[in-house]
Image (cartoon, rainbow, N blue to C red):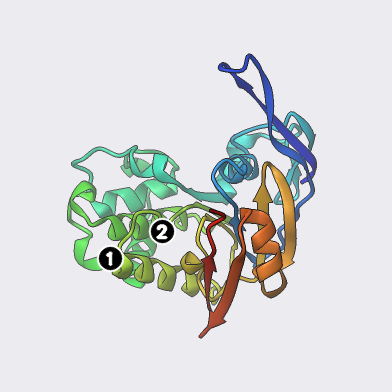
Amino acid sequence: MTGVTVWEWDDRLGRRLPILTDLDWSVGAGEQWAVLGPNGAGKSTLLDVGAGMRHPSRGEVEILGETVGRVDLRVLRERIGHVDVKTEEAFSARMTAWGVVLTGVTGTIQVLEDRLGTDDRERAAQLLEQFGCAAVADHAFASCSQGERRRILLARALMRRPQLLLLDEPSGGLDLPGREALLAALAVLAGEQPAPAVVLVTHHLEELPPSITHALLLRDGSAVACGAAPAVLADEPLSACFGVPVRASRAGGRWAARATPSW
């Protein structure tokens, strides 16, 4: 994306406010990006633009070689996997985990049996096994643990072998075992051939898998730092992004950060 700006109307103030401002950003094939920043930095809006779900107010967006505004977005979205809280809330309480994964073939919230083949069912079974959810395949999706639901949605997003995978706070609200299981599932993606490009939005460095290659830091809709993860996920850029002194560390491929409150 080049020079992307997104405005949003604020009813309370009675005027438009910038959510993203003059953002230049590019994600290469197979790269795994972390997008971090404080609340209101524009992270989820950026993901919506990258998913073709929202048009920029100004600037140009190119997704998988196609320019937004000159392509059928419905067709383009078939090449994109997108996981967020809204997806988790969309399914019937009675739908099984198996059914949820199968809906990834058609991008719907219902299983369309007439559009499924043997290959689709085999891939669904393989993904559920790969992400440690085979044992709950026949369980109601709503009865699965939060960590299991996130991994099931990840499996759903991968059913069509997307070239781009967008994850909006996938570890949010998970307990420690659930978070670690999800991160292990994400790390597996880096070894796939061809591996999808991944963009993961989070607030916390501890929620990043070791496979992260690049990072973008946002504050007030603008990029504070952007590039290779080791250079960006460092004390100075993180302190500028979050507005407090931050000390970052890395051990065993995993990141961590501690902040000193400003009061």
Give the left or right position of residue 155, taking residue 132 as reference: right
The front one of 147 and 221 is: 221
For disc 1, the marked residue is 133
Instruction: Find residue 217 and report its horizontal and vertical position in percent.
Output: 66, 56
Q: Amino acid at mark 1?
A: Cys
Q: Secondary structure at mark 2?
A: loop
Of tags 1 and 2, the one toward the viewer is 2
89 lies above or below 217: above
Q: Residue furthest front?
A: 263
Residue 221 percent coordinates (x, y): 68, 42
- Vertical side of 163 occupied by 188: above or below: below
Quick one: which residue is furthest to the top in this view?
Answer: 14
Element under disc 1: loop
Q: Residue at coordinates 50% horizontally, 71% vertically from top-left?
A: 209
Query: Is 164 rendered above or below residue 41?
Result: below
Whether residues under marks 1 and 2 lie with C-beta atoms below 8 angstroms apart, the answer is no
Disc marking residue 123: none
Relative to 188, is 126 on the left or the right? Answer: left
Q: Which mark is residue 171?
A: 2
Kind of residue at badge 2: Ser
Residue sitting nearer the eye, 50 or 216: 216
